[in-house]
Amino acid sequence: IDWTVSNGNDDISYYQVGRTIAGSNDELISRVDHNIGQAEYSYLEDASGFRGKTIEYRIVAVDRRGDSQLLFQDELVVPRASTRLLPNYPNPFNHETRVSFELSDPCEVSIEIYDVSGRRVAILIDGREFPQGLHQIDWNGTGIDASPLASGVYYCRLKAGKEILTQKMLLLK
């Protein structure tokens, strides 16, 4: 949130940043001190925890006597997270790689590894329920029988609910 004040407001002591989330109670979340001669102010908040919700922000100026005045209010709709299969890291990898995925809603998840011929060679997650949010799992480059796989291109397949996403991986020995 950015706001600008005009010069001559030297009796302002500080600004209150408040918010209301989707009909909940008003909440004071920050105090920003007023600096004489400064005209531009900002407040930054990570709103990823409020995905799919509407947040109303308010900036209130409080003067040295304690009197307050609403400067402005603004509404922000935080977009819902999408289900994503993120690139594995590191890629290419030698011994181990991390597979990360984000879920827009709680759902049943399966993660399988396929070789270039389409043969399933590893199962990392087999139909387990996960909550909404960011998750990760490490893979050590072994197959279903726990033997090390050969160097080459592999495909990581995420099935999350009804969505299927695929990511290319390169195993180098």
Image (tube, grey):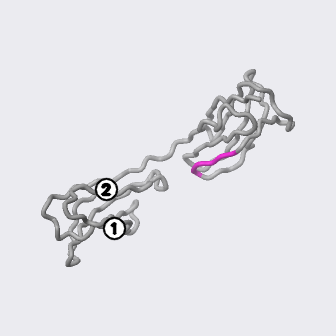
Identified at 21% across, 72% down, the residue is: 63
Q: Secondary structure at mark 1?
A: strand
Look at the picture and state if 85 lies above or below 50.
above
Residue assigned mark 2? 42
Q: Is residue 117 left or right of residue 130?
A: right
Residue with the most extreme top position: 117
**Percent x, y of residue 71:** 22, 62
Q: Tag 1: residue type?
A: Arg
Q: Is residue 91 left or right of residue 42?
A: right
Q: Nearer the viewer, residue 42 or 81?
A: 42
> Of the numbered discs in the image, which one, if any, rests on residue 132?
none
**For the N terminus, which image quadrant?**
bottom left
**Percent x, y of residue 135:** 63, 48
Residue assigned mark 1? 31
Q: Which residues are magenta?
A: 132-137
Separation of disc 1 and disc 2 at Cα? 11 Å
Q: Secondary structure at mark 2?
A: strand
Displayed quadrant of residue 159: top right
Q: Main secondary structure of the magenta part?
A: strand
Disc 2 crowd rating (10 Å Cα; few below 14, some 14-19, many 20+) is few
**Percent x, y of residue 87:** 60, 36
Task: Assess whether residue 136 is covered by the magenta stretch.
Answer: yes
Task: Assess whether residue 47 is covered by the magenta stretch.
Answer: no
Q: Nearer the viewer, residue 7 or 69?
A: 7
Label 1 vs 2, first from the N-terminus? 1
Q: Is residue 101 left or right of residue 113?
A: left
